[in-house]
Image (cartoon, rainbow, N blue to C red):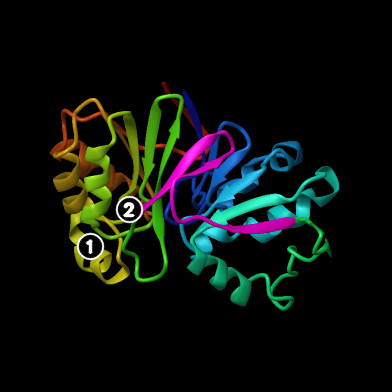
Amino acid sequence: MISLRLLGCNGGIGGKDRQTTSYLLQESTIIDAGTGLTILDLPELAAIDHVVLTHAHMDHIACLPLLIDSVTAQRESPVQVWTLPEVIDILSTHIFNEKVWPDFRKIPSPDSPFMTLNAISQRTAIGGMFFTPLSARHGIPACGYLVENEGVALAFSGDTEDCPSFWEAMKQSSTLKAVVVECSYPSALTNIAQVSMHMDVPSIVARVAELPKEITVVIVHRKPGLEDAIEAELRMQLPSRDLIFPKPGDVLSFG
């Protein structure tokens, strides 16, 4: 069984019902560290042992530096951050560089840090689950993830334009229960989706139509002000699919 709490699932901010990407799995592991982390209280933040990042865009890492800083007095072990090697380089150069934010890999000492950055490039055990990076196309180093636990698998697209190899991986998983996939724009803004390398309604419709009908499709990363248009179009064009359009704080269980 996999418990998924969608702390943030929007493509931007604006009011309490819009928080950027952060998903809590099994209480102690999160995928991405966007503003959705702010809905957790301090004990819940301190319980996070693992942070798995899809890429280094700000809406996915905004609260990572603040998370580490906030829980140091509540934890006895470092927060383990997992991501692609290229993303580690970006974080080291541009975030944890002693200018934008302290390098918590060295504080209070390199032998006893508040944070570690760990490279992930293949199926890896993290927080009692298995994470496998999946292909993504977003113009920078980025990936999605297949998460497996006790015979249940969920797929997370991260931010990406249409990526055939991501969808091919869905067909290879016999235990897949749900796909958490971004859809940033309605069909009227396909040109913006292409320029920004995001999914839009036409690309989602084409790909979801190929998935077995028993697989739940969770639509995330809708851009602010476009949520209703995206939902209306997808429900009209995929009337027989189990589509979920979550809000921050929603909890889903798959087993």
Near mark 1 (Cα within 10 A), the count class, few <14, some 14-19 or many ≥20, is: few
**Residue 251 in the image, given as x and y percentages of width and height:** 49, 29
Q: Which residue is mark 1?
A: 189
Q: Image check: 45 left or right of 142? A: right
In this rendering, the answer to whether 44 lies above or below 50 is above
Q: Amino acid at mark 1?
A: Leu
Q: Which residues are magenta?
A: 115-134
Residue that sits furthest to the top in the current view: 255
Label 2 vs 1, first from the N-terminus: 1
Question: Measuring 33% from the left and 33% from the top, which residue is drawn there?
Answer: 178
Q: Is residue 231 visible?
A: yes
Q: Amino acid at mark 2?
A: Leu
As helix, strand or loop, the secondary structure at mark 1 comes to helix
In this rendering, the answer to whether 168 lies above or below 119 is above
The reply to whether the C-beta atoms of the residues labelled 2 and 1 are less than 8 Å apart is: yes
Residue 226's disc number: 2
In this rendering, the answer to whether 148 lies above or below 143 is above
Dominant secondary structure of the residues highlighted in magenta in the image? strand
Quarter of the rendering containing residue 153: top left
- In the depicted view, which residue is nearer to us: 70 or 12? 70
The quadrant of the picture occupied by the C terminus is top left
**Magenta stretch containing residue 129, yes or no?**
yes
